[in-house]
């Protein structure tokens, strides 16, 4: 009994497979038939149509004129052109006939002009020998004189000529510096007056304070030819350098 049931199950399974296969085949035939019928009903053209496109250019839109009257109906006044004046007729002053004799006009000499200018009643002569035409002012022209020289001491720059030493005094060597064989340099600023003498001497720079007083004492005894500006003697501000050197 068990074997019979198994055989029936296999037969039923084979029948189902066959039915599914037949169903797919039938549906496929139906689809193919429909597609073939649709292709047969379509007629394709035998030649391509002879068509061409004509370009159409659209005109820009026109704006309609505004409604109503512009400016409220008032008309704008037009400017009236100015009338040109006719040129004035010039009178012809030339004589129609020429005279036989013409009297020459009296020429005006510089002396007459001077006399007319001096008709105010003054007998004093005008002008001076050194005067020039169209000049004003009194007195002869100023001579080419040099500028005034200042009364204050000025440094040696520009047109200032430096003073020249005439008499020099050697400074005393400080004992401590001499025993130590020490060399030194002192720069002294001073004023050399118009007589060539030195005043207001002071130390600007120094290599050692031991040399300061000895340098000032010596410089105050020096004598110079004074400095000049435009040929005039002046007081000058001058720097002097005093050197201390031990000679072996």
Image: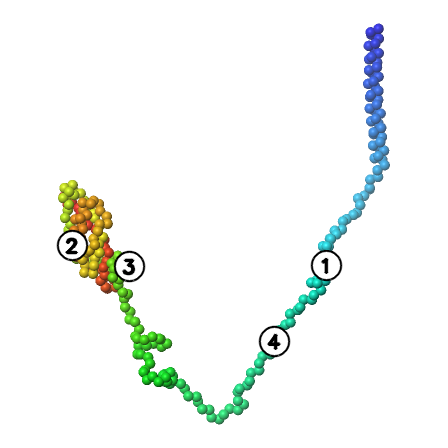
Q: CA distance from mark 4 to mark 3?
A: 72 Å
Q: Between 90 and 101, which is closer to the camera in this rendering? A: 90
Residue 173: x and y in percent read 15, 46
Q: Which residue is mark 3?
A: 158
| Element at label 3 | loop
Residue 99: x and y in percent read 49, 92
Q: CA distance from mark 4 to mark 1?
A: 41 Å
Residue 220 - label: none
Q: Which residue is mark 2?
A: 221
Q: CA distance from mark 3 to mark 1?
A: 87 Å
Of the two numbered discs 2 and 4 on the same chain, state the one appearing first in sequence.
4
Asked if marks 3 and 1 touch (Cβ < 8 Å), the reply is no
Q: Residue at x 15, y 45 (%)?
A: 174
Residue 71: x and y in percent read 69, 63
Residue 74: x and y in percent read 70, 65
Of the two numbered discs 2 and 1 on the same chain, state the one appearing first in sequence.
1
Q: Is residue 110 visible from the viewing direction of this image?
A: no
65 lies above or below 83: above
Q: Which residue is mark 4?
A: 84
Left or right of 5 on screen, residue 214: left
18 lies above or below 247: above
- At label 3, counting other C-alpha atoms closer than 10 Å, the crowd grade (few under 14, some 14-19, many 20 or more) is few
- At label 1, counting other C-alpha atoms closer than 10 Å, the crowd grade (few under 14, some 14-19, many 20 or more) is few
| Element at label 4 | loop
Q: Which residue is mark 1?
A: 66
Asked if marks 2 and 3 touch (Cβ < 8 Å), the reply is no
Q: Which dot, 4 or 3, sits closer to the camera?
A: 4
Of the two numbered discs 4 and 1 on the same chain, state the one appearing first in sequence.
1
Asked if marks 4 and 1 touch (Cβ < 8 Å), the reply is no
Of the two numbered discs 2 and 3 on the same chain, state the one appearing first in sequence.
3
């Amino acid at each position: 009994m068990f074997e019979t049931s198994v055989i029936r199950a296999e037969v039923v399974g084979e029948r189902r497979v066959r039915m599914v296969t037949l169903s797919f085949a039938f549906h496929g035939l139906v689809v193919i038939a429909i597609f073939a019928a649709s292709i047969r009903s379509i007629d394709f053209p035998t030649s391509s149509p002879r068509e061409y496109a004509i370009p159409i250019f659209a005109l820009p839109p026109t704006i309609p004129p505004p409604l109503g009257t512009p400016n409220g109906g008032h008309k704008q006044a037009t400017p009236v052109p100015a009338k040109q004046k006719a040129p004035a007729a010039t009178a012809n002053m030339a004589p129609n006939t020429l005279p036989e004799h013409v009297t020459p006009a009296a020429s005006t000499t510089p002396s007459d002009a001077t006399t007319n200018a001096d008709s105010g009643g003054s007998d004093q002569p005008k002008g001076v020998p050194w005067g020039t035409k169209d000049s004003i002012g009194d007195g002869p022209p100023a001579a080419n004189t040099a500028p005034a020289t200042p009364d204050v001491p000025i440094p040696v720059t520009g047109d200032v000529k430096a003073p020249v030493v005439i008499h020099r005094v050697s400074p005393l060597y400080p004992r401590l510096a001499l025993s130590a064989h020490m060399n030194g340099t002192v720069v002294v600023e001073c004023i050399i007056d118009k007589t060539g003498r030195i005043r207001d001497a002071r130390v600007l720079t120094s290599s050692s304070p031991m040399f300061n007083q000895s340098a000032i004492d010596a410089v105050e005894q020096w004598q110079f030819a004074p400095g000049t500006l435009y040929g005039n003697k002046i007081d000058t501000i001058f720097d002097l350098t005093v050197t201390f050197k031990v000679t072996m």
